Image (cartoon, coloured by chain):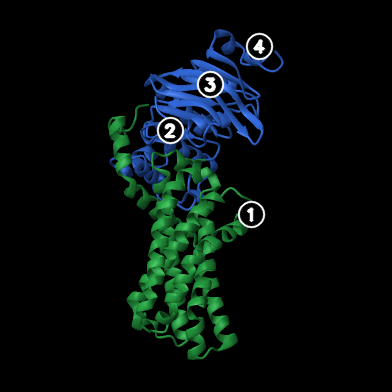
Amino acid sequence: MNALDLDDVWKFYGDFPALRQIGFQVPEGVCLALLGRNGAGKTTLLRIVSGLMRASRGAVRVLGADPRDGAARARIGVLGHGLALYDELSALENLTLFARLYGLNDARGAAGRWLERIGLAISATGLVREFSRGMRQRLALARAFLHEPDLLFLDEPFTALDDRAVATLQELLRQAVRDGRTVVLSTHQLREALELATHVALLVRGRLAYFGPRTAEMLEDPSWLYRRYGEAA
Amino acid sequence: MTAPAGTQPDTAPRVAARARRGFLRSALTIAAKDLRAELRTKEALNASLAFSVVILLLFSFAFDPTVEETRALAGGLLWLVFAFAGALILNRSFARELPNDCLDALIAAPISASALYLGKALANWLLLMAVEAVSLAVFGVFYNAPWTRQWWPLAGVVALGTWALTVVGTLFSALTVNLRLRELMLPLLVYPVLIPALLAAIQLCGPLALGEPLASDMMVWVRLLVGFDLIFTVLALMLAETALVG
């Protein structure tokens, strides 16, 4: 079964087609780097496959189900542009909330263990609004990985992360890939993404310009893909 | 790095089944989260309470109503205050989720949109009931209204009327959350829909607020209020997914 299956997907904002005829399949266990310039449609595509919005046309299957299917969503982890944390709740309360929503058995215990894992156990009862940017970022990573999802959608996960959060994220992603989980991440940080990725999709103005395995050329010269398949090509 | 012991959930289908069964638990989790957040910031609660108390006090001092005048205006005045105070609470309901894109995380979680909606509606209802309890106490003191004589019927009518306000207002709060003019749009959309429920609540609260029992011919208003609540609760639960995801 494919982790992700898109067939002729279109998304219109008014009359403007943000996505045009997108179609590809992502097998399970793959790490897909979703690349493209600003406005190429990466975030729109990730929002559609995450079940946050519906496609205007076409078919989307996530883990064999509709993205809004509850069973599918229980197996998906999403990290978007925002950190999705409540400033007025503590770190422990934030993680416990999402652990409960994802149906984890020992929600509070799981939250506590993740706080230890990301080095925030000492600040567990501190309100998130009092946290530094780096602490919030690590907490957001824990929120996305809390329920050990089979499929991860990460939108610009490396953007504005501090060194420690980058290290935490890279470690979590490498572990996820080793565990055979599927990871789809959009990013402008080509080198970090291509080092992790097994497959690459390039969007150009809402169209899929390239989809396939990551090649040696891409790793040696990360901008090669844009030169070969991007707008300049 | 390995996963912390105990965080591995059961098999995915079991997790999904548990998520489906946990509709009410999810709603209560959302409600508890909203109440905790609101009680820490008191953003909507303070504004709503201040508005209610100030309006009741000003009206009392400005008109110094007699018992007969109070009988005539009690229902209307109370529900005018409740409705506008409610808008302050309802406006914050989904707007609270906008910073940090928290709404996306809730929508992506394996809970139904209707559970998310119901949780928010429950939290709004409890907050508004608290504001109304304080308002009624102020009303009793400053208008010499012995409403405690009809404590249970009044509480029932206020609860039903507040649920009508909440159930409609929470749905429109979800619909208008991404609008720049949501503070303006919410009352404009909610109040016309609420007219039947507000009429019923005003009619019923008039005598009850003065400690008088309901006449038998007033039961039609009770039935209207209950019917409104049932119909709009079902409608809102059905429309929650569309309102939140499209």
- Of mark 4 and mark 2, the one earlier in the sequence is 2
Q: Nearer the viewer, mark 1 or mark 2?
A: 1
Query: Pointer 3: what residue?
Result: A33
Where is residue A116 shown, x and y percent of the image? 37, 38
Are the residues under marks 1 and 4 on the same chain?
A: no
Q: Are marks 2 and 3 in contact (CB under 8 Å)?
A: no
Q: Can residue A126 be seen from the camera position used here?
A: no
Chain where mark 2 sits? A
- Measured in 3D between alpha carbons, the distance from the residue under mark 1 to the one under mark 2, in whole angstroms, is 32 Å
> In terms of secondary structure, where does tag 1 sit?
loop
Q: Residue furthest right?
A: A232
- Measured in 3D between alpha carbons, the distance from the residue under mark 1 to the one under mark 3, in whole angstroms, is 38 Å
Tag 2: amino acid: Gly
Tag 3: amino acid: Ala
Marks counted in the figure total 4
Residue A215 badge: none
Query: Pointer 1: what residue?
Result: B181
Where is residue B186 shown, x and y percent of the image? 57, 57
Are the residues under marks 3 and 4 on the same chain?
A: yes
